[in-house]
Image (cartoon, grey):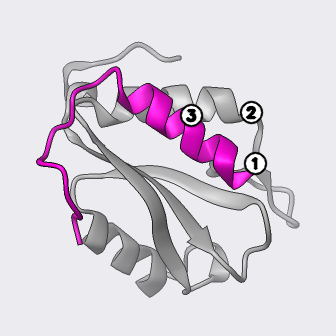
Amino acid sequence: MPALGQSDYDAGWVYIAVSRKLGPGLYKIGLSRHLKSRCDSLNRKSYLGYSDWYIAHYRSVSSMRAVEWRLHECLGVPYQTEEGGTEREVFKVPYPKAVRYLDKFSKHFKPAYPVGSPF
């Protein structure tokens, strides 16, 4: 894991996003201070060519970058596109495994926001 700078300890949300059209078992793992805006942005920009993204699971944490890095490390090799590129935030992994790791790592960083939906 890269060294963490002060801005990496910012509070926010770590999420698992899903596009039904992308394919089974592929999930985007990301972070944001504003989940609804982030989901809207994924769809507006047609991330990876798809505009049906939704946030399937998320956790509020006091250090979103640290949690995201740990999650990326545990999920393995990022998704390789058909064009040969790498999407460093998309992983082919069983959904329950992604949720389990997100929940596990977020427990180490107290929630940054009150419990409840950010939408």
- Above or below residue 28? Residue 23 is below
Q: Earlier in the sequence, mark 3 or mark 2?
A: 2
Question: How far apart are labels 1 and 3 at the CA level?
Answer: 11 Å
Q: Which residue is disc 1 drawn over? A: 93
Question: How far apart are labels 2 and 1 at the CA level?
Answer: 9 Å
Q: Element type at marker 1? A: loop
Q: Which label belongs to residue 101?
A: 3
Q: Where does residue 98 sit, x and y in percent of width and height?
A: 62, 44
Q: Which residues lie in the magenta part?
A: 93-119
Q: Which residue is disc 2 drawn over? A: 76
Label 1 Cα crowd, 10 Å radius (few <14 / some 14-19 / many 20+): some
Question: How far apart are labels 3 and 2 at the CA level?
Answer: 12 Å
Specify the amino acid type for callout 1: Val
Q: Element type at marker 3? A: helix
Q: Earlier in the sequence, mark 2 or mark 1?
A: 2
Which residue does the image show at 69% across and 35% down from the upper left?
A: 75
